[in-house]
Image: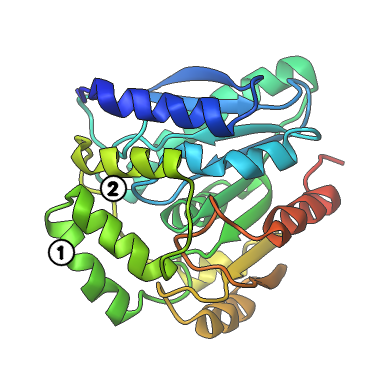
Amino acid sequence: MTTIDDAFLAAYDAVLAARWPASTESAEIRTPYGTTHVNSVGPADAPPVVLLHGGGTTSTVWSDTARALGTAYRVHAVDTVGEAGRSVAGERAIRTLGDQMAWLDTVLDAVLDTVLDASGTSTVSLCGHSYGAWSALHYAAHASGRVRALVLVDPTNCFTGFSRRYLLRALPMLLRPTAGRRRAFLEWETRRAALDETWLRLYDRAAAFPAARPLTGPRPGPEALWALRLPVLLLLAEHSRAHDIGRVAASAAALLPRVETAVLPGATHHTLPLAAPPEMDARIGEFLAAHGRDD
């Protein structure tokens, strides 16, 4: 069972207080893999949108997106079990893709149970960044009947592999994740972009978080993606160092029947979604207005 450091929790709460709406509600969802923490914004009876963060960042990174979507949707930002955040891993670890899908099944069960009581909605819109996009895409293939629309924000290991330079730069941080190494890598990938200091303090604290080894696995197979008939919005960071966005866009276009693709100007992989250009949340809002509600 994970024990979370008090200083990390204080830094986490400081980000919520500084960047999230005062109306933000938090909940704990019991799953076979531990307790999942969710930060929620928006009307209780509005269509649900579930946000999945990238590695090492926590759900707090979605503050601007939660604000932008929270007027028309019930937005649920999830702390991934085993990652830095307020979720608490249980004795049963997420070790396989099947475990990851079962964990998300339970989380979405809880989200949909709440909405069913209010409006009868039976599906969610799913949005993920980086590793969260990998999980979201796999989940859409796993349970397409539960997902009405899918948003992938600079997704990694979904349509192409990582840049070799990116992996080499990340290796010291992955082998021994100190605050200094994490900050140096972040500054390299973002080209020293100005990021919120309150959030950066949380990011530094996450270096000592007792996180499990992140689940890695294969990209979704071509057959699974060709069969995916739901609408997909693919948003790519113009200056991402994680991968070649041209190759990502071309591969996604060849594999997904209903994909819309846009490049976010000035963005890098790790400035998203915390310091995204205004175009990101505007595009997500337009996409969900067209596809994010049950008929």
CB under 8 Å between discs 1 and 2: no
Which amino acid type is marked by label 1?
Pro
Judged from the image, the secondary structure of the residue bearing numbered disc 2 is loop
Q: Which residue is drawn at 63% across and 43% down?
A: 64
Q: Nearer the viewer, residue 179 or 117?
A: 179
- Which residue, given by chain and number where applicable, does mark 2 sit on? 96
Around disc 2, counting alpha carbons within 10 Å, would you say few (fewer than 14), some (14 to 19), or many (20 or more)?
Answer: few
Q: Quadrant of the C terminus?
A: top right
Residue 238, horizontal then vertical, whole percent:
57, 76
Q: Is mark 1 on a helix, strand or loop?
A: helix
Identify the amino acid type marked 2: Thr
Closer to the eye: label 1 or 2: 1
| Residue 34 visible at all | no
Residue 17: percent from the left, percent from the top?
Answer: 53, 25
Labelled disc at residue 172? 1
In-front residue for pair 261/241 = 241
At 68% from the left and 62% from the top, the residue drawn is 233
**Residue 196, x across and y down, in percent:** 48, 46
